[in-house]
Image (spheres, grey):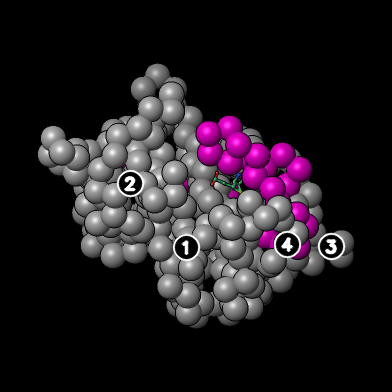
Amino acid sequence: MNEESLRKAFIEDRIAKTEGTRLSLPFFEVWDEIGSTNTRAAELAKAGAQSGVLVTAERQTAGRGRRGRVWESPAGSNIAMSLVLRPQVSLAALPQLTIIAAVAVKRAFEALGAAPGIKWPNDVYLSGRKCCGILVESVLEKGRLLYSVAGIGINVKKSAKSPEVAALSTSLEEEGILTEREPVIVRIHNELTSLCETWERTGNLSFILDEYTKSMLWIGENSRIIDASGAFTEGVIRGMNESGELLFETAEGLRSVYAGEVSLRPATKV
Ligand code: BTN
């Protein structure tokens, strides 16, 4: 058995032992090294992989973050996982998938005894620093969803980082959480696929709105909502609506904005 199949067998064993698991993974791949688990999951999806198929890697050489950024995945320090999903929702609702993925990670962190916060729309924080990033990529053809890939990167072990990055990011280890990675992967997979099933019935985020809002960072705080050109609006964060739009209050009144359009920063940190 090579290293890859050993890890795969280990995940299988963990899946069998994870309490409450309702999961029988249809198919999954465990890579020691790969460019990006999102790219591989997309290849599998294109070849017809069903919803729930999972790809994980010890190390990514071309990990992708949001807004074209690079996502570092040093060997043995991270979780890098991507799920193929084929949610049966309207195209208008599809951007909500990224928020659902954040809730799945939040629940997995809570199961480890942590108190995560979510920076809208989908960064999961511990003690005010980012511990998990999510990149959802969907492919459409002729106005119809072909597939989505939900890519999740979690800092598990403390790793060498520059002082600037250290101030902004944390890991489970730095937060005092020592865990094997496999049960966390299984938990997230389980939560995400189950949340997607409910979402397909509701067609919106009403079923997790309270839960999400309770964990949402910077509610009631003055923040900058920054668009792609760098222009910003200042407003007080009030929450999120069931379409996944950020709600914020400006001098002109309550406004809402989609995740794809802007990024968010507390006004005190700019
Ligand atoms: C972010 O910019 O915050 C999103 C980071 C997403 C990283 C994960 S790691 C697994 C998957 N594969 C990738 O190439 N990216 C995502």
Pair 4/2: label in front: 2
Magenta span: 60-89
Residue 270 visible to the viewer:
yes
Q: Name the element at disc 4.
A: loop
Residue for point 24% across, 56% down: 220
Amino acid marked by disc 3: Glu
Residue for point 43% across, 24% down: 229
Question: Position of 212 compared to 52: left or right?
Answer: left
Reading the image, the residue beneath label 1 is 128
Q: Identify the mark nearer the N-term, 4 or 2.
A: 4
Reading the image, the residue beneath label 3 is 3
Distance from disc 2 to disc 3, alpha carbons, whole Å, reads 47 Å
Tags 2 and 3 touching, CB below 8 Å: no
* Corner quadrant of residue 87: top left
Rendered location of residue 28, percent (x, y)? 64, 55
Amino acid marked by disc 2: Ser
Reading the image, the residue beneath label 4 is 159
